[in-house]
Amino acid sequence: MGFIKELKKGLWDEIPVFRVVLGMCPTLAVTTSLMNGIGMGIAATFVLICSNVMVAALRNVIPDKVRIPAFIVIAATFTTVTDLGMNGFAHELHRNLGIFIPLIVVNCIILGRAEAFAAKNTVWLSLADAIGMGIGFTIALMVLGSIREVIGNGTLTLWTGIAWNVPGMHPMLLLILAPGGFVTLGLVLALMNRIEMKLAAGKGKAYSPPLELDCRHCVICKWGSPTTSKTDAL
Amino acid sequence: MKDILRLIIALTVISSAAGIILAVTNKVTTAPITTAAQKETVEALAAVLPPFDNDPNTCAATFTENGQTWTFHVGRKAGVFTGAAFEAIAPNGYGGEIRMMIGITASNEIQRIKILAQKETPGLGTKIAEAPFISQFDGKRIQSTVWAVKKDQGDFDAVTGATISSRAVLGAVKAGLDVYGKHAGEIARTGE
């Protein structure tokens, strides 16, 4: 029961990229194509599972004062294992993802889950948390990667050889350049809030997006005025 | 004091365990990584060289010019020199280094050029790796060609919107061909 609950929360309620807005560096940088998104997602998931399980197993052994360096060493070890393993056994993917694999170690999601979850929970629940968060991260990267590849390049490549060329498409280059990452991410976040709003309205409840994700804490225009109630502003 | 000792021991044990895991992984993956890198070179050589039946990966001559090392891989068929291939690196691409493999025939023409690695702007600079830009090189004679883009009074059309990338490729090709010209006789005799 607990296992399923911890696993499911990473898929929608606390999906790392879209809800918690963590791990932005790899997210915006590698999602220029679906294939890169999948590769990065799987690599990060593997590191996340290993580090979460290890941190949970050692949570009573690691003294509190040195827990952060210990977590970093654990994450760095598994990242290097992934890096070497991919270089040897998935050489082409490794070449495409380039410098982003070593950067998994500073991916906030890894340290965030270690600190916020694995350090306080059992190995079993931490495993569920890591799998859920990893899959959520992979899904987020796949969504962003697909949108950017289809619109920005006019193709959708699942694997070398399995590709779909969008017919009659004139690619909009902006989407696979750096600004396109921000634009796509913003639109997907807006869409998710819209869906949440509809779902809440169906249940007869008012929905307000997490405050840190929108502009209402700024008071320059009337939407952000602190006197306006949040639901009115919508 | 006792507390500090506990912290030191904990960190030491964790780091040592990490070290052991990394050492084992390194040992296991060294061979596959070398094989994969070698396979990449062999595939690139096969793509740019005229037909050959020897092993150009090992049949090679190395020269040092201006502090840079150039390795020329020699292709032979039934013992006769059919062409040479070498890797050139353009340090001045728009997004960093551009690595390419250049193949030359025995009659001093470019057989083919293949871009191995690049970090140019997606959709603009990356077109240097595709036809029609890269296919302009096929069959060009080394002596009678001006290795520059048309903007610089050369013989090559630059990729639209990516003049810097195009110039970088041509610069590297020209530098490589100069070295080849100096040592052509010696390269042709390699592996006889």
Image (spheres, rainbow, N blue to C red):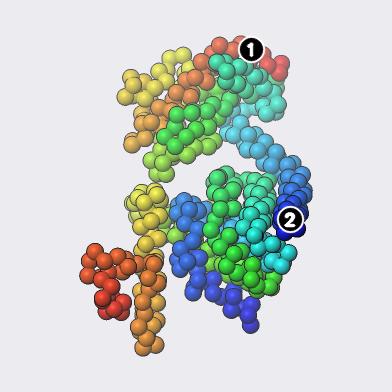
At horizontal 71% and vertical 16% (from top left) the residue drawn is: B192
Residue B115 lies, in percent from the top left, at 51, 34
Quadrant where the N terminus of chain B lies? bottom right
Q: State the count of labels.
A: 2
Residue A91 lies, in percent from the top left, at 63, 45
- Give the amino acid at mark 2: Met
At horizontal 34% and vertical 21% (from top left) the residue drawn is: B152
Q: Disc 1 designates what residue?
A: B186
Count residues near mark 1 (Cα–Cα under 10 Å), then give few for <14, some for 14-19, many for 20+: few
Looking at the picture, does residue A43 appear above or below residue B154? Answer: below
At horizontal 36% and vertical 29% (from top left) the residue drawn is: B157
Task: Using the image, name the chain to which the residue with label 2 belongs.
Answer: B
State whether residue A70 appears in this view.
Answer: yes
Looking at the picture, does residue B182 appear above or below residue A42? Answer: above
Does mark 2 fall on the same chain as mark 1? yes
Q: Disc 2 designates what residue?
A: B1
Q: Is residue A179 left or right of residue A143?
A: left
Count residues near mark 2 (Cα–Cα under 10 Å), then give few for <14, some for 14-19, many for 20+: few
State whether residue B139 appears in this view.
Answer: no
- Give the amino acid at mark 1: Glu
N-term mark: 1 or 2: 2
Q: Residue furthest front?
A: B1
Secondary structure, mark 2, is: loop
Depth check: A111 or B64 in front? A111
Residue A218 lies, in percent from the top left, at 30, 65
Looking at the picture, does residue B152 appear above or below residue A119? Answer: above
